[in-house]
């Protein structure tokens, strides 16, 4: 009983909204922990599962860079905390996106799009899958280089990895275009193959994620304190139990698995 | 495999700790720097209901306009909140935006004035974060609408002596302070601290003139409207009515620095939830990979 790709899109969007609406490190750390939990419980085995770790590292790098930018201006605890919280928000959004990439097959998005929007959906799916595909090809290239006895760690091995990866990306794109053309893509209407069921678990996950997003959006619009902790002066971020519970609803996709599937 | 799992856990822990470390370090930074006899500057805060003059002791020969507000907060308990990376003033004395958007109450906002002449004010064009304030300088913030000195409410004329000079002998008759109840515009959605300030009678004598020293800043962003105001226990002997000719500005009395706050209770609950989720993720991982 898998979660529908559209439900995963809803989950990722809602988690992104939650992360976007706050700079409170408590909420953001909770969302990151939830993303890790959902990834651990639901990720699809295979090369795309690596995308979580890659996006986590990218998020940490983004946070570090955002914080380091402070050192070009006035450096004090307030400014550093402000920049770190902004960077953490970015890192959270990246981690959520990494989880989304690891738990769902982007081409499932194409299948469930209305026929009229098939082409834009395909383009979106391709764009979404660039990161996992690059990660997968990087892993393949690295394995191949290891088999040839080349070093695959360190900066000096980077060119030996980057060129085959770029080449593979080009080849993949050409192959995809050829295969789409060969299957008559863009010529006339298409029939639907194996529609995916929109099951109860998907509805549950979507509803929980929507509730979390609505709660945080409402809090942001009504100006509830604590979403953006004051750094001038530097104060302890205020945390509300209600919003914590709302953010916790994002963990439903990870929880519902243990009941249903083996 | 086991190593990879351990590494994931370490990364997750590092994320959480890295995010919280700057916050943990936060409360130890504020330090009181009230020194009498050193350089002083006047800070006038005009909430449109009441103008309060603060005689702020500077901790350096020249500070920025925003640091002057921070010093006033340390010395008088003035509540404030800066935004846009500390370059704009969102809230002063409980009036203004409490979110991160300092112009959330536009067209009302905190207009910034520099002192000109002995008691006048000119509209400041730059950011307070860049403006140097030295000994004897005057700065003012005025809440209102309008993008220039002619349309924005200009703070009442105040000399440096009005704020910092030798106090005149206490006036036996209470000075006619403008009644705060007569002008009830509520510029911000949540400025309960303001209403708590309006309660006291505005005797011109020795009592605290109802500045915001009561609402303990430092206990959380909403402390202005959740905490019950603690009575100001230190009626300053120098606090006195301004010269009877200009009752528009009330001089602020020094207040004890607010107690430093600890982490919020719900924040600890959040940390617990985060730990639980991390452990749950590890268990889920093990269950998927382990037996086969």
Image (spheres, coloured by chain):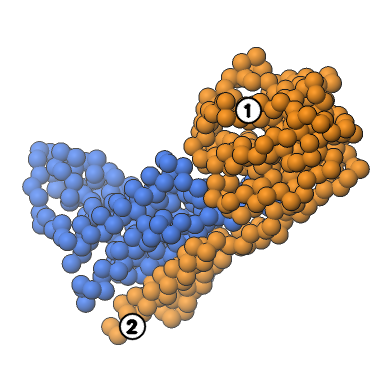
Residue projecting furthest to the top: B150
Q: Is residue A119 visible?
A: yes
User: Dot 1 corresponds to which residue?
Assistant: B179
List x then y, in percent, for residue A82: 60, 49
Quarter of image, res A168: bottom left
Q: Is residue A209 above or below residue B3?
A: above
List x then y, in percent, for residue A18: 40, 51
Q: Residue at x 74, y 51 (%)?
A: B233
Task: Identify the image quadrant of the N terminus of chain B.
Answer: bottom left
Q: Is residue B83 visible?
A: no
Q: Residue at x 24, y 44 (%)?
A: A121
Shown in blue, the chain is: A
A262 sits to left or right of A134: left
User: Dot 2 corresponds to which residue?
Assistant: B290
Task: Identify the image quadrant of the C terminus of chain B.
Answer: bottom left
Using a 10 Å C-alpha cutoff, classify the residue at mark 1 as few (fewer than 14 neighbours), some (14 to 19) or many (20 or more). few
Q: Secondary structure at mark 2?
A: loop
Residue projecting furthest to the front: B172
Q: Colour of chain B?
A: orange
Discs 2, 1: same chain: yes
Q: Residue at x 62, y 49 (%)?
A: B229
The CA distance from mark 2 to mark 1 is: 74 Å
């Amino acid at each position: 009983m898998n979660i529908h790709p559209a439900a995963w899109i809803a989950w990722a969007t809602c988690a992104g909204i939650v992360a976007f609406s706050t700079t409170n490190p408590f909420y953001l750390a909770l969302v990151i922990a939830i993303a890790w939990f959902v990834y651990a419980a639901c990720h699809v085995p295979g090369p795309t599962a690596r995308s979580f770790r890659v996006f986590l590292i990218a998020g940490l790098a983004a946070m570090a860079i955002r914080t380091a930018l402070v050192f070009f201006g006035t450096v004090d605890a307030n400014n550093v905390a402000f920049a770190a919280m902004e960077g953490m928000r970015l890192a959270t959004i990246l981690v959520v996106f990494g989880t989304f990439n690891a738990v769902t097959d982007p081409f499932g998005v194409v299948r469930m799009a209305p026929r009229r929007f098939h082409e834009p959906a395909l383009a979106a799916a391709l764009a979404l899958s660039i990161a996992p595909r690059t990660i997968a090809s990087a892993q393949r290239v690295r394995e191949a280089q290891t088999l040839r006895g080349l070093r695959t760690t360190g900066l000096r091995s980077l060119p030996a990895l980057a060129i085959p990866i770029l080449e593979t990306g080009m080849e993949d794109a050409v192959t995809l275009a050829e295969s789409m053309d060969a299957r008559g893509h863009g010529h006339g209407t298409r029939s639907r193959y194996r529609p995916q069921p929109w099951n109860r678990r998907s509805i549950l996950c979507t509803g929980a994620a929507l509730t979390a997003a609505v709660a945080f959006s409402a809090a942001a619009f009504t100006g509830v304190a604590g979403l953006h902790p004051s750094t001038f002066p530097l104060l302890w971020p205020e945390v509300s139990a209600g919003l914590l519970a709302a953010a916790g609803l994002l963990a439903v996709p990870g929880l519902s698995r243990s009941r249903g599937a083996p | 495999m086991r190593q990879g799992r351990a590494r994931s856990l370490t990364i997750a822990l590092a994320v959480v700790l890295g995010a919280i470390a700057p916050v943990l370090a936060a409360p130890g930074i504020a330090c009181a720097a009230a020194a009498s006899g050193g350089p002083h500057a006047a800070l006038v805060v005009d909430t449109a209901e009441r103008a309060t003059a603060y005689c702020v002791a500077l901790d350096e020969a020249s500070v920025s306009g925003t640091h002057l507000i921070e010093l006033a907060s340390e010395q008088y308990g003035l509540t404030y909140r800066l935004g846009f990376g500390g370059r704009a003033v969102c809230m002063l004395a409980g009036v203004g935006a409490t979110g991160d958007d300092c112009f959330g109450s536009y067209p009302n906002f905190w207009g910034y004035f520099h002192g000109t002449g002995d008691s006048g004010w000119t509209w400041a064009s730059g950011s307070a974060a860049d403006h140097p304030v030295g000994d004897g300088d005057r700065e003012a913030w005025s809440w209102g609408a309008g993008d220039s000195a002619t349309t924005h409410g200009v703070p009442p004329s105040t000399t440096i002596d009005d704020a910092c000079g030798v106090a005149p002998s206490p006036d036996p008759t209470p000075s006619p302070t403008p009644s705060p109840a007569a002008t009830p515009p509520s510029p911000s959605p949540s400025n309960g601290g303001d209403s708590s300030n309006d309660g006291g009678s505005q005797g011109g004598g020795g009592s605290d003139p109802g500045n915001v020293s009561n609402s303990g800043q430092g206990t959380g962003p909403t402390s202005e409207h959740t905490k019950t105001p603690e009575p100001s226990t230190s009626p300053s002997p120098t606090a006195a009515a301004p010269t009877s000719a200009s009752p528009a500005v009330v001089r602020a009395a020094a207040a004890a620095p607010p107690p430093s706050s600890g982490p919020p209770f719900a924040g600890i609950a959040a940390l617990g939830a985060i730990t639980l989720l991390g452990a749950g993720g590890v268990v889920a991982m093990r269950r998927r990979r382990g037996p086969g």
